Image: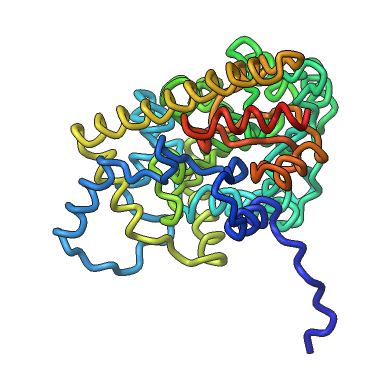
Amino acid sequence: MFAHVAPYAGDPILGLMEKYAHDTRASKVNLGVGIYYDEAGRIPVLESVRAAALRVLSANQPTSYLPIEGDRDYRALVGRLLFGESFDALGDSLAIVQSVGGSGALKVGADFLRHHFPSSTVYVSDPTWDNHIGIFEGAGFRVGRYRYYDAVTKGLDLEGMLADLHELNEHDIVLLHPCCHNPTGVDPDRAQWLQILDKVQERKLIPFVDIAYQGFGESLDEDSFVVRELAERGENFLISNSFSKIFSLYGERCGALTVHCADASQMRNVLGQLKLTVRRNYSSPPTQGMRLISTVLGDVALRNEWVAELTSMRERIVVMRERLHAALFSAAPHCNFDHILKQRGMFAYTGLDTSQVSALQSDFGVYAVSTGRICIAGLNTSNVKYVANAFARVV
């Protein structure tokens, strides 16, 4: 019956994790997967989340099916996190559904848009997270690319990006990374973002903002600048957000999809269609992770503790960038790695090519994505010099 089914080539990053797991070298270093590790090389359990878990456990609440759109309090807390003080004024304009992680939010958004804008094309940055393409193609969209990363300067190709956006058609969908761009770590500054959003507005495009790292760039408020600016402009747009990284809750699959409706009278219809889309996908979202996040964000003391922990994670990433740069300068003074300091978030686009990445893996057990992307959060004081020396041997 299934003789015609083709084999699956595998996900490049998850496949890399499998190779790493089977590597027996004690010196191996995993810089491929996008997971935050602490200084000891462990996935942390945040103390704020641990305290929330004790409360949730002691409450011993039943876990019935949630509404299709998810828990009401959770959805409101998501809106407040994204929009800050503006949330109270915007509430009637926001259709928010709880989702199965950020990927689930992207999937629901893609299906919703495909049904209502079937002739549109989706455009993603070049490069972008591989699954962006997979999710939108899987929904039936044509997916194109706009220029973003300049391989020569190892920075933003703003001129190329604006030129490409100018050529898009009305109601084409443009996927934007508002902070901590994955995979490059290259972010526009505020002035550049204003130019980009001006062009999006001028061409009457549909922005789809994917924010998986809010708080890992500058701060919770600063990293949501694009979201709040679009709302201030009265634009219709979508937001997918994830709590995997910023709460260190990867396996709980917690996220949300938010649609900002410039005409508040349309919000109920949009929310209804999002619920229909969810019903056709997974019917209703999970409970446990939602309760943990709602407990933290809904309690002033726990929220403050979480913000402090998030700040510590962000600051550790910055320190490891600086130490990697210093170690690379010492190990390979003939190479310029200053771009690593200018990038933000969990990832760095090193500039290494495929053969150099392959040599890192085979000769030194240092695992990176074939594009040269590394996860800065995988570095610590025990391995950063080893990684830098390995880099020096392959460049």
Residue 350 versus residue 296: which sits nearer the camera?
Answer: 350
The one nearer the camera, 252 or 366, is 366
The quadrant holding residue 31 is top right
Residue at (51%, 66%) from the top-left corner?
A: 282
x, y percent for residue 314: 44, 27
Q: Is residue 371 above or below residue 136?
A: above
Q: Is residue 156 left or right of residue 28?
A: right
Asked if 105 appears above or below 215 in the picture, the reply is below
Q: Is residue 263 visible?
A: no
The image position of residue 345, as x and y in percent, is: 54, 28
Q: Residue at x 75, y 27 (%)?
A: 351
Q: Residue at x 79, y 45 (%)?
A: 143
Q: Is residue 290 left or right of residue 251?
A: left
Residue drawn at 19 percent across, 59 percent down: 57
Give residue 69's position: percent from left, percent from top.
Answer: 42, 55
Q: 234 or 42, which is in the foreground?
A: 42
